[in-house]
Image: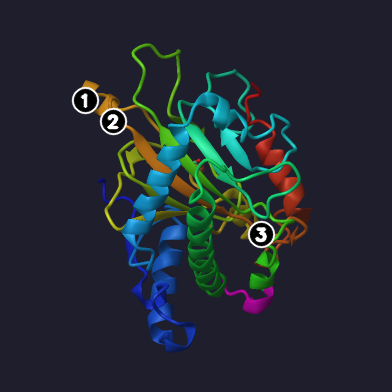
Amino acid sequence: MSGYIPVVDFSAYSLDNKRKNVNDADLEALTDELMQAFTTVGFVYLKNTGIPTSEVNNVFDVYDKFCFQPEAVKEKYSRPVDRTAERHGWMALEREMLSLVGRDTPAPGDLKECFNIHPPLTEGQTWPEEIPEFEPVMMDFYHKCHVIAMRLLELIARGLGVEDVDGFLGKFKYVGKGRNGTNLRTLRYPPVPDVIKKDQVRCGEHTDFGCLTLLFQDNHGLEVVNADGEYVPASPIPGTVVVNIADTLQRWSADKLKSTRHRVVMPESPEERQRVRRSIAYFFHCDSDVELNCLDGSDKYEPLLAREYLNQQVGATYLSG
Ligand SMILES: O=C(O)CCC(=O)C(=O)O
Ligand SMILES: [Fe+2]
């Protein structure tokens, strides 16, 4: 733990706290702390969110169960290769390469296996019937993340001085209902094989596309770029969730909020290389048809639909195959 990423106590606005019981002075202090971090580092560790660790572990276990299914079963839930398809479904090892947008040298696929959950399911999409608890466990977790993300967003809007905070929150009304890119992704990085391809990593260097990301992790490997452009570890701290600003919110805030590059590296020691890494990312997006006008009233960026911006960002990312 480098100490570079601050730990912020979210008790004042945790899931256990009903909105009407929340103390405004506490929220203001929390907002200041979050803004300090999100305008510089772009990342925080959030503790006391009210999401129990047992539920996080349950999501890891349910996804493990899926990963241990025969390949033919998993294939049934494979996400279509078509880049324009909705982001729902399973992606096999090496199927995706996350790397900086615009990078032009092809790199090997990431050594990870992930499942994107993007409700509501549309035609042809199904929940894994082999694991009956998959849908309820994932959806319950999705809803908890949604509440935390909305609360964070409200504080960020206040911190940015947005006048119509409710109006701003209203630009996220289709989360989980369609016309919105929010998705929950479970990830499993298997033990590192003896032979790997040149430049192959667990998850390539990138920034996230949406507005905010919540990331739960059980093992080392995540690294975040610091102010000097160097990677520092963002190792798991028990009981916390990593939260970071993503590209859409950076652009929308006219770069006041920072979307910071990060990656997941291979462990060095032979013992560590044998350890699986599991993580869960909740990618929180605004509604697809929102027009991104700089929230500070400036014209730093041209107005652009969130959907169009997302498509630009996603374009260079997915390996077909
Ligand atoms: O697995 C992780 O910890 C990071 C994954 C990630 O950054 C992503 O999928 O955007
Ligand atoms: Fe990421």
In the picture, which quadrant includes the C terminus? top right
Labels 1 & 2 near each other (Cβ < 8 A) = yes
Disc 1 to disc 3, how far (Cα)?
41 Å
The percent coordinates of residue 17 (x first, y second) are 40, 79
Q: Which residue is mark 3?
A: 286
Say what secondary structure mark 2 lies in: loop
- Single out the mark in the foreground, 2 or 3: 2
Whether residue 226 appears in this view of the structure is no
Label number found at residue 275: 2
In which quarter of the view is residue 275 placed? Answer: top left
Q: Is residue 226 left or right of residue 148?
A: left
Observer-nearest residue: 271 or 164? 271
Q: Amino acid at mark 2?
A: Arg
Q: Amino acid at mark 1?
A: Glu
Disc 1 to disc 2, how far (Cα)?
7 Å
Magenta extent = 160-167
Labels 2 & 3 near each other (Cβ < 8 A) = no
Residue at 41 percent across and 60 percent down: it is 37
Q: Is residue 207 above or below residue 45?
A: above
Say what secondary structure mark 1 lies in: helix
The percent coordinates of residue 23 (x first, y second) are 40, 86
Q: Is residue 276 above or below residue 227?
A: above
Disc 2 to disc 3, how far (Cα)?
35 Å
Scheme by which the image is coloured: rainbow
Q: Is residue 54 left or right of residue 145?
A: left
Of labels 2 and 3, earlier in sequence is: 2
